[in-house]
Amino acid sequence: MTQRINVVGTSASGKTTFSKALAQKMAVPHIEMDALNWQSNWEACTFEELLIKLKQCLAADSWILDGNYSKTTPVKWQNVDMVIWLDYGFGRNLYQSVSRTIRRLMSGTPLWEGTNNIESFQRAFLSGDSSIIWWMIKTHGKNQRKYQHIMANPEFAHIRFVRLTSPKQARQFLQQFNACYFLFKSDKN
């Protein structure tokens, strides 16, 4: 049985943490889109390079994909079974974004294995273009509108959408998740 799930949500919503836990529970590969995209020295790969990497990862029978990257939707949702949207409130996401950034500043560990990409005070708080905090502030409302529209779009009727609006709901989902959960459930959240 194939199981292909994409976890989406605003930056700092906890997509990677949630995705890793779900992938471990299901015993399937976890794919992090940021790790596919970001190379050393904060250089993003080209869109073509990202698509090649993504297609290679998605060739597996089952996976948990973590990340938005809207331009890749035609590829990543071609065979997806479920999309889990971590749709937390603005205040929760802002708190998570700031606290996560501070933890990363203090630890100095690279964000993605095989890169030297670490948080810096300059990048985190003084650089509008590359600040993950500013990015979260700028995209939170836009992401909510986008995913509400997508969930109602008949083009994506083949996908089971699950909308989790709090960390408590996310924990409950993980606790109750059964590998066959989405195959037998007919209602859409």
Image (cartoon, rainbow, N blue to C red):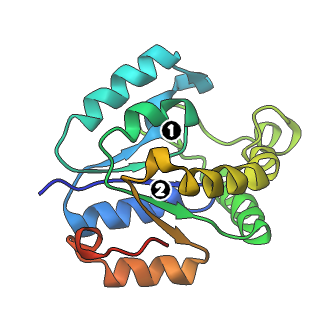
Residue at point 61% right, 26% down? 42
Q: Which mark is residue 63?
A: none
Q: Which mark is residue 34?
A: 1
Q: 155 and 31: which one is in front?
A: 155
Question: Could you tell whether 53 is left or right of 44 in the image?
Answer: left
Q: Which residue is mark 2?
A: 16
Query: Looking at the picture, how far across and down is residue 179, in whole percent?
Result: 21, 70
Identify the element where label 1 is drawn: helix
Residue at point 26% right, 28% down? 56
Q: Residues within 10 Å of mark 1 (few under 14, many from 20)?
A: some
Disc 2 marks which amino acid? Thr
Question: Could you tell whether 117 is left or right of 7 in the image?
Answer: right
Query: Looking at the picture, how far across and down is residue 82, in whole percent?
Result: 37, 58
* Quadrant where the image shows the N terminus: bottom left
Q: Quadrant of residue 166?
A: bottom right
- Disc 2 and disc 1: Cα gap in Å? 10 Å
* Residues at circles 2 and 1 in contact by the CB criterion of under 8 Å: yes
> Could you tell me if residue 46 is visible in this image?
yes
Disc 1 marks which amino acid? Asp
